[in-house]
Image (tube, rainbow, N blue to C red):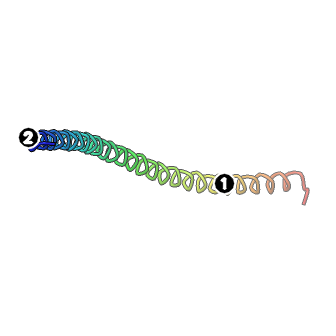
Amino acid sequence: MTLNEREIYYEQKIKEYENNLNQAIRETQCIQGELEKLEQEKILHDNKSNQIINSLKQDHEILKSQLNEFQNQGLVLLLLLLFLYRKFFNRSNTKYNLK
């Protein structure tokens, strides 16, 4: 191989390596762009998930409060019915002398 042939060969190899390097750089940039896109999507999904979780926690607290209120109302109604039952029962027993 002559000096000129070697020079041409090495220049071709250098161009080939440069092309490979440029291709690798483009692929890396493409992958970085995709990664950034995925990170942004993850942030959006995390935010939505947190909003849903917070909303569910608030709904749970509201429902728990309503349940307590209904239970308290139920106890009051039960006591009222018991009072009225005793009042009626005692009155009807005395009326008919069932004591």
Around disc 1, counting alpha carbons within 10 Å, would you say few (fewer than 14), some (14 to 19), or many (20 or more)? few
Contact between marks 2 and 1 (CB within 8 A): the answer is no
Q: Residue at point 22% right, 39% down?
A: 23
Please tell me which residue lies in front, 70 or 6: 6
Q: Is disc 1 placed on a helix, strand or loop?
A: helix
Q: Where is residue 76 in the image (x, y as percent from the top left)?
A: 62, 56
From this view, report whether residue 74 is shown above or below residue 18: below
Could you tell me how far apart the alpha carbons at marks 2 and 1 are, in whole angstroms? 112 Å
From this view, report whether residue 79 is shown above or below residue 36: below
Q: Residue at point 9% right, 44% down?
A: 3
Q: Residue at point 70% right, 57% down?
A: 83
Around disc 2, counting alpha carbons within 10 Å, would you say few (fewer than 14), some (14 to 19), or many (20 or more)? few
Please tell me which residue lies in front, 56 or 3: 3
Q: Earlier in the sequence, mark 2 or mark 1?
A: 2
Q: Horizontal placement of 92 versus 42: left or right?
A: right
Tell me the residue that label 2 is attached to: 4
Q: Residue at point 28% right, 44% down?
A: 40
Tell me the residue that label 1 is attached to: 80
Question: Which label is found at residue 99?
Answer: none
Q: Position of residue 59 (x, y in %)?
A: 47, 48
Going by the numbered disc 2, the residue's amino acid type is: Asn
Going by the numbered disc 1, the residue's amino acid type is: Leu
Q: Is disc 2 placed on a helix, strand or loop?
A: helix
Q: Which residue lies furthest to the front in this view?
A: 1
Quadrant, the N terminus: top left
Q: Where is residue 11 in the image (x, y as percent from the top left)?
A: 12, 41
